[in-house]
Image (cartoon, rainbow, N blue to C red):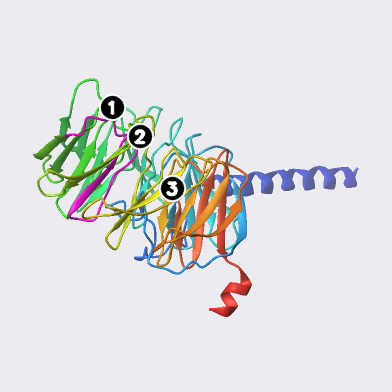
């Protein structure tokens, strides 16, 4: 009888410990987050200008450090890298925190039914857009593991943009709002256009102004502090992928084989790159050192002169490119819908390396400390680093 009591008690203890452990794993509480530094990826494309560039060496061949199963697919934006964690948002509405070194799950929180856009981090606060669900935007304290506030609006597809003391977000109905990041109150609101949706994230043009483009191809520059419109421009082709800027020009990909550079200060067209095949959809660009890089559904990665639009080089494969490339000091990394990851010489466009993945790449990449983070459909997060032989020779 005593043995039976001991067995039942033991089982009860084990069950309780299991529940506590599982609940601890589920909670998104990063008590060891520490201070966010300049090398971290705190928003879509690393910085508010959405440049998708990292000032680091990442020489191939790369080797897989770990692979993590997030249980669902991802939106088109990049993951975040904060301190010792990778944060990946899924179309199941979850944000997963993954240990950067081990690939182990350090926490998870669910926000609505789906998260399509990349969250934005400010210190320990995470601003999460809700694609579908009861709330459209959340502020979450990563160190406390608790929501600070949430607001009800139309769904938000793109990454929020933090500019000074204003959090900018654009919903699927084309309404731009400036929120107080402290409590979520709306400081100003501006409907851009009736019956036009916004899928792309807003882009910071400078410290005070940002740009947003809708699925009719209408682009506007606004003041973050008050929402005043500075200029507008009609591209004549829809924009679904997030633009990028080098502070002088705003680079806009469209779904009609058209890529346009506008003057960031005036909105005037500086140049355009147009294909005869108007069925080609261009993905979000990356920008670095006077060049703009972007792929398309025609399977070509292009490098253009940022000032003139002149083609510097092209790299082509038999699979489509649907996500932004990532630019490092010497290379451009890009994933394809054919389950491949490529490294291309930044100066010449010559292929330097490739590897096959478990799924298609439909999301932008991220990098930090000589490591590359890749999201693949239907549910995997990869961490790569230069192979040991390459590290030893450098």
Badge 2 element: loop
The residue lying toward the viewer, choosing from 28 and 104, is 104
User: In which image quadrant can residue 222 be found?
Assistant: top left
Query: Where is residue 11 shown, x and y percent of the image?
Result: 78, 44
The residue lying toward the viewer, choosing from 10 and 90, is 90
Does the segment drawn in magenta span residue 242?
yes
Q: Nearer the viewer, mark 3 or mark 2?
A: 3
Where is mark 3, residue-wise?
Answer: 364
Q: CA distance from mark 3 to mark 2?
A: 15 Å
Is the C-beta separation of discs 1 and 3 under 8 Å?
A: no
Residue segment shown in magenta: 234-254
Query: Where is residue 330 shown, x and y percent of the image?
Result: 42, 67
The quadrant of the picture occupied by the N terminus is top right
The residue lying toward the viewer, choosing from 361 and 129, is 361
Which residue shows up at 28% across the image and 31% down it? 198
Badge 1 element: loop
Where is mark 1, residue-wise?
Answer: 197
């Amino acid at each position: 009888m005593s043995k039976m009591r001991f067995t039942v008690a033991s089982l009860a203890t084990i069950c309780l410990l299991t529940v506590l452990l599982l609940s601890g794993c589920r909670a998104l509480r990063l008590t060891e987050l520490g201070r966010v530094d300049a090398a971290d990826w705190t928003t879509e494309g690393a910085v508010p200008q959405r440049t998708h560039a990292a000032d680091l060496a990442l020489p191939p061949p790369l080797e897989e450090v770990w692979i993590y199963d997030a249980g669902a697919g991802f939106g088109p934006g990049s993951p975040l890298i904060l301190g010792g964690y990778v944060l990946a948002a899924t179309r199941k509405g979850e944000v997963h925190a993954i240990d950067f070194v081990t690939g182990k799950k350090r926490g998870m929180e669910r926000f609505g039914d789906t998260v399509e856009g990349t969250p934005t981090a400010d210190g320990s606060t995470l601003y999460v857009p809700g694609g579908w669900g009861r709330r459209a935007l959340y502020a979450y304290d990563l160190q406390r593991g608790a929501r600070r506030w949430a607001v009800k609006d139309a769904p938000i597809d793109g990454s929020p943009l933090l500019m000074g003391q204003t959090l900018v977000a654009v919903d699927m109905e084309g309404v731009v709002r400036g929120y107080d990041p402290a409590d979520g109150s709306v400081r100003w609101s501006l409907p851009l256009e009736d019956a036009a949706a916004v899928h792309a994230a807003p882009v910071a043009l400078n410290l005070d102004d940002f740009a947003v483009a809708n699925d009719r191809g209408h682009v506007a520059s606004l003041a973050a502090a008050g929402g005043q419109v500075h200029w507008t421009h009609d591209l004549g082709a829809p924009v679904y992928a997030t633009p990028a800027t080098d502070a002088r020009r705003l680079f806009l990909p469209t779904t009609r084989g058209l890529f346009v550079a506008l003057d960031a200060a005036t909105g005037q067209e500086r140049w355009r790159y147009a294909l005869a095949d108007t069925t080609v959809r261009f993905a979000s660009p990356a920008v670095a050192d006077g060049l703009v890089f972007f792929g398309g559904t025609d399977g070509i990665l292009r490098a253009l002169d940022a000032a003139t639009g002149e083609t510097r080089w092209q790299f082509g494969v038999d699979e489509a490119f649907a996500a932004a490339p990532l630019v490092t000091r010497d290379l451009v990394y890009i994933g394809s819908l054919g389950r491949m990851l490529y490294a291309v010489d930044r100066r010449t466009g010559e292929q330097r390396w490739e590897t096959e993945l478990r799924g298609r790449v439909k999301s932008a990449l991220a990098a930090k400390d000589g490591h590359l983070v890749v999201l693949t459909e239907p549910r995997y997060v990869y961490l790569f680093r230069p192979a040991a032989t390459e590290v030893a020779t450098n």
